[in-house]
Amino acid sequence: MKETHVQGQNLNNAGPPPRRRRWALWLAPVVLILLVLWGILPRIQARRELREDTRRNAATAVVAEKPQKGQPAQEVQLPGNVRAFMDAPIYARTNGYLRHWYADIGTRVRKGQLLAEVETPEADQQLAQARADLAVAQANAALSQTTAARYQGLLQSDSVSKQDTDNAVASARAQSAAVVSAEANVRRLGELQGFQRIEAPFDGVITARNTDVGQLINSGAGGTELELFHIAAVNTLRVFVNLPEAYTSDIKIGMPATLTVPERKDRSFTGTLVRTANAIDPASRTLLVEVDVDNRLGQLLAGSYAEVHFHVKSTLPSLMVPVSALLFRAEGLRIAIVGPDNRAKLVPVTVGRDYGTHIELLSGIGPDDLVIDSPPDSLLDGEEIRVVQRQTQPTHAENGKGPAPQRLTPSIPPPQAATARTGDGSK
């Protein structure tokens, strides 16, 4: 009995049963695999994050802002050329020598006022000769008419032939026509002699005098014609302005306009839009308009430069973007906006008023689009981008103990901060 008991104990201590040994064999590789994965997975995740960061950082960093709505009522400021209402050069109509002049530059003259006198000895002699020729023609005509009358009387008694009578009558008619021709020549030379007096064609001011006493005057026949005077009507001035095509619907005939000139910065002048060219210039895409200004006080000078201000209320919605956002491409003007999936989208736009640092866009983008400011010239449509905030200039507080300045995205200044003003005239 004792031996049997000892053998039973040895059998119980021989090891785990076969099933537990199999579980241990299966569990050991699983634990080993888990340990390996626990060490490899973080590295795989780190590599994935590194690749993503590298791709994200490789994308072009841009600053994007929403455009600001333009003001509906604004003042359009455009350059203008001031011209005289009437402007004409004065030439001599006859040949001779200048006897005397009576008006110099700056002289205000009235219509018909004598400006100069020309001495015309040749024209005087030609007129005398023409009058003598007229007297000869009149004498010949009188003799021919007498002869014709006599022949007609003799023809009744058959004293002369019919042929001789017809010849006498025809000769009388020819001599009468010669008298008419001589009279016309006398009148022509009389008119030419009348051009000895050079008179002002309209009220104005003499702006140029290109002759002097004793100078040879040539009317242009067989030589170079000389401009003697230049006269301009300056009581009313014309101001010509090239209006951009986008604002042609905002202006009306009769609307007021304000003028400023560099030499009179202390005041402005009021004019009226009187007419337009009614056609767009295909080269500049502008409409030529004319503004008339009362200048009876003589405070404006013809030929000067002026800035013309039109108070308009635009009917087209507009948006303001920085000028630096424009892209000049071969296919035309473009604006880069942030498209889906952070990719650049180049869209064509129509520009309006230029305010210096900002420009008005009439079409192409919406108020909710993110416009890329200062995009690189190499930016392509569909290129991946990374939107960042605009950073302000660093100050000494960033290097000291003071708090660092906030990093903000400045908004677009209102249009009246540039050259435009609101409709009520406030700056």
Image: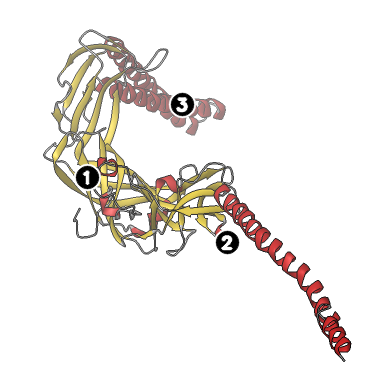
Does dot 3 land on a helix, a strand or a loop? helix
Q: Please tell me which residue lies in front, 241 or 176.
A: 241
Image quarter in which the N terminus is found: bottom right
Question: Which-is-in-front pick, marks 1 and 2?
Answer: 2
Q: Residue type at mark 1: give it.
A: Leu
Residue at figure coordinates x 42%, y 64% from the top left: 367
Say if mark 1 contacts mark 2, CB within 8 Å: no
Residue 143 position, x and y percent, is 38, 21
Going from the N terminus, do you reach mark 2 or mark 3 first? 3
Going from the N terminus, do you reach mark 1 or mark 2 first? 1
C-alpha distance separating marks 2 and 3: 101 Å
Above or below 364: residue 291: above
Please give the residue where the numbered disc 3 appears in the rendered image. Answer: 174
Residue 159 position, x and y percent, is 50, 26
Label 3: few (<14), some or many (≥20) within 10 Å? some
Label 1: few (<14), some or many (≥20) within 10 Å? many
Question: Which-is-in-front pick, marks 2 and 3?
Answer: 2
C-alpha distance separating marks 1 and 2: 51 Å
Q: Please tell me which residue lies in front, 321 or 32.
A: 32
User: Does residue 139 appear anywhere in the picture?
Assistant: yes
Q: Which image quadrant for residue 296?
A: top left
Does dot 2 land on a helix, a strand or a loop? helix
Going from the N terminus, do you reach mark 1 or mark 3 first? 3
Residue 61 position, x and y percent, is 50, 49
Above or below 361: residue 122: above
Residue 286 appears left or right of 104: right
Please give the residue where the numbered disc 2 appears in the rendered image. Answer: 341
Residue 178 appears left or right of 415: right
Q: Residue type at mark 2: give it.
A: Asp
Residue at figure coordinates x 17%, y 33% from the top left: 263
Please give the residue where the numbered disc 1 appears in the rendered image. Answer: 259
Q: Which image quadrant for residue 133?
A: top left
